[in-house]
Image: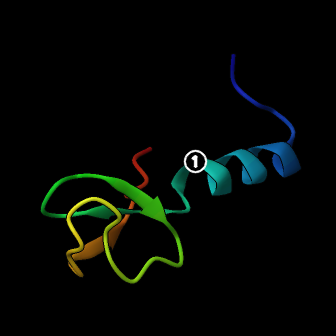
Amino acid sequence: MPIRDPEKLQLALEHHFKVKICRRCNARNPWNAERCRRCKSRDLRPKRYKK
């Protein structure tokens, strides 16, 4: 069921996509992470948004 309310949609997208993904072990990390929580790598990327 799609979300029609723009405020709720923005909140949901921010909650879902405001994470960083480790390129080495694919772990989800907090947005403000400097290092991966699992493998301690610094090679992090923001989660991609696909439409």
The image quadrant that residue 4 belongs to is: top right
**Secondary element type, mark 1:** helix
> What x and y, as percent, mark residue 40?
24, 73
| Residue at the top extreme of this rendering | 1
Instruction: Tell which residue pokes out farthest to the left in this image.
Output: 24
**Vertical relation: 20 (above or below) 2:** below
Counting the numbered discs, the total is 1
Residue 37 x, y percent position in the rendering: 35, 64
Q: Which residue is mark 1?
A: 16
Q: Is residue 7 above or below residue 22?
A: above
Q: What percent of the width, then of the height, locates residue 44? A: 28, 73
**Residue 29 or residue 47, whichever sits in front:** 29
Rendered residue at 30%/52% (across/down): 27
- Going by the numbered disc 1, the residue's amino acid type is His
Position of 5 with respect to 29 (left or right) is right
Residue at 39 percent across and 83 percent down: it is: 34
Left or right: 12 with respect to 40? Answer: right
Q: Is residue 31 left or right of residue 22?
A: right
Instruction: Answer with the quarter of the image where residue 1 lies.
Output: top right
Figure coloring:
rainbow
- Mark 1 is surrounded, within 10 Å at the Cα level, by few (under 14), some (14 to 19) or many (20 or more) other residues, namely few
Q: Residue at 83% across / 47% down in the picture?
A: 6
**Image point (83%, 44%), residue name:** 8
Q: Position of residue 46 (x, y in %)?
A: 39, 68
Which quarter shows the C terminus? top left
